[in-house]
Image (cartoon, helix red, strand yellow):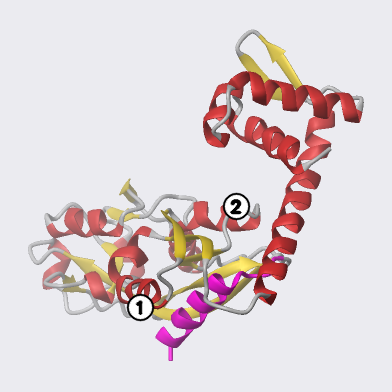
């Protein structure tokens, strides 16, 4: 058993396809099949059921999955720890993700500073939804992520708040609520709400607030792109909660029975992972942003 066979196993298990795994690993499909066959021989168990074109992980494969991820994570961790001992400039590859909103409205100046100071670092930069990036860090596929922090963090995730993002209740200037000096949460439920998707961290915060008042949201449209939500609000399709940076010329509502709604934006990494020099330096730059 070696890292190459475990990488092939994880790629097939997560993609559900030998051909997709081959593309991910830049190998031929036959090479992936040979690695899986070798691993199955070494373990004395079948890891995948192959029925027609369908592939599913067997019970033995399910047992191996978390262990394979842990072995590869520890191997990468050892390489980073050894590399961190080296004296010299910051180099290597940094796997990093940022949410779409942060990428557009918060990250650019800090990323520019990092790239200028660390020209020999190759950025494997992904623009992901916060929840996707969170899972990728948890699985060990990313060193760092800059996202909306989870209201219910996993014990293996270390998170640090960089920005406190105040959300404002907003409507278009010609919305029926725009002429009101004050409104209540109950009154909001009578109108269409436009919010991020049901499984997002931001939506969870909003739903909790309304549930505490025994109210149900009337969400008629949702998208995880806040700029798109702002557009839909601006043409009068409903109300929303948006960061102050996106309010612009929208009407801010005074909701008298709602406490201020804040969401935390920050960095996360796996507690059992030794960060590379590049990741550590980027984390330091980002932490300075919140000071």
Q: Residue furthest right?
A: 44
Kind of element beneath mark 1: helix
Q: Please, what is the dominant secondary structure of the magenta stretch?
A: helix
Up-down: is 171 above or below 7? below
In the shown orientation, is residue 252 left or right of residue 64?
left
What residue is rendered at 69% in x and 21% in y? Answer: 33
Q: Is residue 271 visible in this depiction of the protein?
A: no
Point out residue 49 in the picture as x, y percentages from the top left corner: 74, 18
Q: Secondary structure at mark 2?
A: loop
Q: Is residue 178 visible?
A: yes
Instruction: Name the residue at 20% across, 72% down.
Output: 247
Outermost residue on the top side: it is 52
- Labels 1, 2: front one: 1
The quadrant in which the C terminus is found is: bottom left
If you read the primary sequence from the N terminus, does the residue marked by circle 1 or circle 2 appear first?
Answer: 1
Front residue of this view, candidates 131 and 6 = 6
What residue range appears in magenta?
273-291
Residue 122 is marked as none
Q: Gap in Å between the C-alphas at discs 1 and 2?
A: 24 Å
Disc 2 crowd rating (10 Å Cα; few below 14, some 14-19, many 20+) is some
* Residue 290 shown in magenta: yes
Horizontal and vertical percent for residue 259?
41, 80
Residue 44 % position (x, y): 92, 25
Q: Quadrant of residue 59?
A: top right
Q: Which mark is residue 113?
A: 1
Q: Is residue 7 above or below residue 156?
A: above
Left/right of residue 1 with respect to residue 49 in the rendered view: right
| Residue bearing the label numbered 2 | 141
163 is within the stretch colored magenta: no
Residue that extends furthest to the bottom in the rendered view of this protein: 291
């Amino acid at each position: 058993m070696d890292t190459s066979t475990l990488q092939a196993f994880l790629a097939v298990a997560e993609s559900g396809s030998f051909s997709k795994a081959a593309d991910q690993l830049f190998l031929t499909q036959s090479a992936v099949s040979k690695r899986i066959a070798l691993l199955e021989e070494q373990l004395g168990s079948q890891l995948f059921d192959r029925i027609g074109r369908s592939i599913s992980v067997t019970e033995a494969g399910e047992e191996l999955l978390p262990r394979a991820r842990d072995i590869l994570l520890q191997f990468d961790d050892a390489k980073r720890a050894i590399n961190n001992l080296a004296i010299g400039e910051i180099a290597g590859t940094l796997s990093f993700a940022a949410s779409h909103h942060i990428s557009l409205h918060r990250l650019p100046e800090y990323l520019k500073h990092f790239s200028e100071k660390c020209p020999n670092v190759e950025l494997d930069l992904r623009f992901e939804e916060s929840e996707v990036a969170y899972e990728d860090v948890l699985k060990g596929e990313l060193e760092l992520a800059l996202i909306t922090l989870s209201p219910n963090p996993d014990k293996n995730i270390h998170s640090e708040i960089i920005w406190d993002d105040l959300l404002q209740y907003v409507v278009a200037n010609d919305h029926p609520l725009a002429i009101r000096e004050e409104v209540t949460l109950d009154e909001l439920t009578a109108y269409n709400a436009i919010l991020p998707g049901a499984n997002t961290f931001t939506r969870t915060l909003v739903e909790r607030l309304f549930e505490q008042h025994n109210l149900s949201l009337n969400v008629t449209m949702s998208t995880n792109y806040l700029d798109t939500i702002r557009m839909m609000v601006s043409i009068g399709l409903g109300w929303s909660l948006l960061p102050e940076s996106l309010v612009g010329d929208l009407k801010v509502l005074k909701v008298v029975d709602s406490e201020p709604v804040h969401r935390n934006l920050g960095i996360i990494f796996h507690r059992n992972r030794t960060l590379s020099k590049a990741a550590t330096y980027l984390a330091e730059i980002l932490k300075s942003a919140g000071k």
